Image (spheres, rainbow, N blue to C red):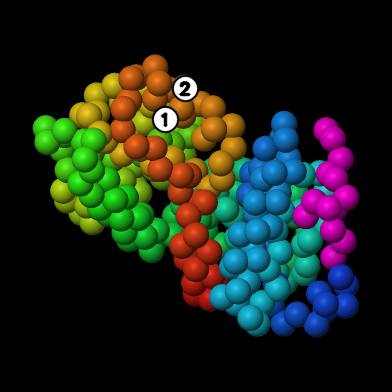
Amino acid sequence: MPSPPPDSPASRPIDAQSASAARKTVVLVAHGQPSAPNPPERSLAQLAERVASFLPDWQVRSATLAQPDRLEQVMQPGALVYPFFMAEGWFTTQVLPQRIGAIDHRQLPPFGQDPTLPKLVATLVQQARAAQSKPAASVPASVPAAPDCLLLAAHGSARGPKAAAATERFASALRPLLPELKVMTGYIEQEPYLADMASKLPQHGLCLPFFAQSGDHVKDDIPAALKSAKFDGTVLPALGTFPEVAHLIAQAILRA
């Protein structure tokens, strides 16, 4: 695996003096991209900086599991660990604790299980629908003013049911907040597959990638599945990349 470039977040040493002076420490941990670890590492570091802007009394650090030794470098005894994952699965229950080892810490629920996330997503989807409903001279009158279907494009897992179950719980919590929309789910690694569900969508639907970061699944697998389904709607950015997420994470840390 290639070493991070000198100016990447993964290469920056932790200032021991500033670390000891900090009253509280939280470490944001994401999966990252093993084939290209540096871009997700930089993206997570930028998110940590935005979260820190809401937490002046905290030191906010970040590490992806894909970046060798990064997590071990930034961990500090007594730190909170915030899993920037969509579900409580193999990585959060097995890999992450093994990597942290005997260092005293407290692990919070993952990003995707935040009880305030459905409300945020409902707001983001309503904003996207409002933007699409603005009249344009080139749009025929027969085209619906706004999409009436939302497809959550999620990872799923061949390892077990936890990932899909978390997505389905999220969809169930979202539906009452968006009664005007039909909320559907489709998966990359298990049934119901994303391409199959996308092919059932009415025209001009919305697709929201239910992912924390924009890795290969978001950049390659989701577009390929939607293309094969002849999906002609709007694909929103990955959920975890919206600017509003930083405040949501900060609030979760304060509630801990």
Q: CA distance from mark 2 to mark 1?
A: 13 Å
Q: Toward the viewer: 250 or 134?
A: 134
Q: Is residue 3 magenta?
A: yes
Q: Main secondary structure of the magenta part?
A: loop
Which residue lies most toward the left here? 142
Residue annotated with mark 1 = 187
Characterize the local packing of mark 1: few (<14), some (14-19) or many (20 or more) Cα atoms within 10 angstroms: many
Residue 216 x, y percent position in the rendering: 59, 32
Q: Is residue 119 left or right of residue 51?
A: left
Q: Toward the viewer: 130 or 175?
A: 130
Residue 159 x, y percent position in the rendering: 53, 30
Residue 116's disc is none
Residue, x 21% and y 36% (percent of image)? Answer: 139
Magenta span of residues = 1-14
Q: Using the rendered view, name the quadrant where residue 234 is placed.
A: top left
Q: Quadrant of the N terminus?
A: top right
Residue 224's disc is 2
Residue 38 x, y percent position in the rendering: 74, 43
Q: Amino acid at mark 1?
A: Tyr
Of label 2 and label 1, which has the lower sequence position?
1
Q: Is residue 155 left or right of residue 183?
A: right
Which residue lies most toward the front here? 137
Residue 191 x, y percent position in the rendering: 38, 24
Vertical relation: 115 (above or below) 65: below
